[in-house]
Amino acid sequence: MDISIVFRIAAVGILVAVLNQVLIRAGREEQAMMTTLAGLVVVLFWVIHYISNLFDTVQTLFQL
Amino acid sequence: MEFIKIVTIGIIGTFLALSLKKNAPEFSVAVIIITGIIMVFTIIGKLSESINALKDIYLKTGLDFSYMKIVMKVMAIAYISEFAVQICKDAQCGLIASKIEIGGKIIILSLSVPIITELINTVTTILS
């Protein structure tokens, strides 16, 4: 399995954190909240994809 | 060799998670989950070999195969609930972790009821 997904998620996290700070300083708290949520949704899609892979692997592994 | 890969992935994951902890806590949990999953994928091959060996040994004993299936299911449930419990504990959600644990135990208990009744039956037939 490639480890690039870990770096991708960390990059999205850092990007969203920086964007959050910039937007808060610019006085737009709502947009800051929205960008955090958007980043979170994207990351959740990747995580759920990997979790479903894990469950399929465990199922085939234990021959269920 | 596999083990070294796991150790490096784990260390990289912890560093990334800690760096994200302060200003983006949700993403640190995501990084922790993904590093856990990738570490499992790198080592899962070895586990499947040993499970097949166990199955062959079990088939030699000539016992009914359904018991082995229940044992396999219990092992799978135990592993997945352990995985989820550790993630929740890591994210400081102890309550959710204990609920998952209780759910896993209940399912394992419900799976093992037929084996227990079978055992009681054999014991009573031997004694009577």
Image (tube, coloured by chain):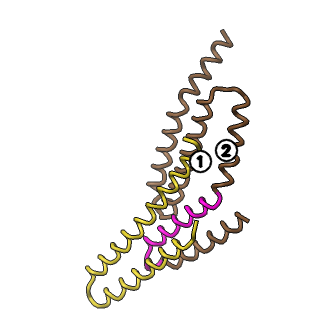
Chain colours: A yellow, B brown
Residue at figure coordinates x 66%, y 66% from the top left: B6
Crowding at mark 2 (Cα within 10 Å: few <14, some 14-19, many 20+): some
For the C terminus of chain A, the image quarter is top right
Q: Is residue B89 above or below residue B114?
A: below
Which of the labelled discs sits on residue B51, or is there none? Answer: 2
Residue A32 is drawn in which quadrant? bottom left
Q: Is residue B45 above or below residue B29?
A: above
Inspect the image, locate mark 1, and give the three-letter code of the amino acid beneath it.
Answer: Leu
Front residue of B6 and B118: B6
Q: Position of residue B42 (x, y in %)?
A: 63, 61
Helix, strand or loop: magenta stretch? helix
Element at badge 2?
A: helix
Residue A56 appears left or right of A25 = right
Residue at figure coordinates x 63%, y 72% from the top left: B11
Residue B126 appears left or right of B98 = right
Residue at figure coordinates x 50%, y 56% from the top left: A53
The alpha-carbon separation of the residues under discs 2 and 1 comes to 8 Å
Q: Which residue is mark 1?
A: A61
Please report, as a chain letter, where disc 1 is located: A
- Please provide the residue range marked out in magenta: B22-43
List the single residue furthest toward the top. Answer: B128
Inspect the image, locate mark 2, and give the three-letter code of the amino acid beneath it.
Answer: Ile
Front residue of B64 and B123: B64
Q: Position of residue B50 (x, y in %)?
A: 70, 47
Q: Position of residue B127 (x, y in %)?
A: 68, 12
Q: Are marks 2 and 1 in contact (CB under 8 Å)?
A: yes
Q: Position of residue A6 (x, y in %)?
A: 53, 72
Tell me, yes or no, whether the highlighted magenta stretch contains residue B13. no
Crowding at mark 1 (Cα within 10 Å: few <14, some 14-19, many 20+): some
